[in-house]
Amino acid sequence: MFFSLGRKQFLFEVGGRKDTNGVDEGAVGVGMRYQQAVGRRIVVRLDAFVAAHQERDEAYGGRLETLIKF
């Protein structure tokens, strides 16, 4: 989704994997990104994710990035 004439963007993703061979390796994950232009040369991004696996603990994390274009 784009907002403010394309200067803001929101992205949402969902993915998964089904166990088909009986070794309990199914998984599902959700991710999101929000980015916004600041001025003419700077973009600020915020990413976050959550993932779950049948045989492991849940994983989650995030990232904040500032991109400067020359």
Image (tube, rainbow, N blue to C red):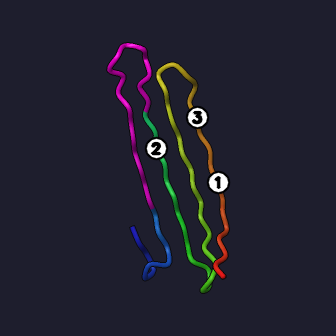
Label at residue 59 = 3
- Out of 20 and 46, give the one closest to the viewer: 20
- Write the residue at 44% across / 78% down: 6
Q: Where does the magenta region start and end?
A: 11-27
Q: Would residue 21 be found to the left or right of residue 31 on screen?
A: left
Residue type pointed to by label 2: Val
- Write the residue at 43% across / 34% down: 28
The residue carrying mark 1 is 63
User: Residue 11, percent across and down?
Assistant: 44, 59
- Verify CB contact (< 8 Å) between mark 3 and mark 1: no
**Position of 58 relative to 3 (above/below):** above
User: Residue 23, percent across and down?
Assistant: 42, 14
The residue at the far top in this view is 22
Q: Is residue 58 magenta?
A: no
| Image quarter in which the C terminus is found | bottom right
The residue carrying mark 2 is 30
| Image quarter in which the N terminus is found | bottom left
Residue type pointed to by label 3: Ala
Separation of residues labelled 3 and 1 (CA atoms): 14 Å
- For mark 2, give the secondary structure: strand
The residue at the far left in this view is 20
For mark 1, does the 10 Å Cα neighbourhood hold few (<14), some (14 to 19), or many (20 or more) residues? few
- Write the residue at 47% across / 69% down: 9
Separation of residues labelled 1 and 2 (CA atoms): 15 Å
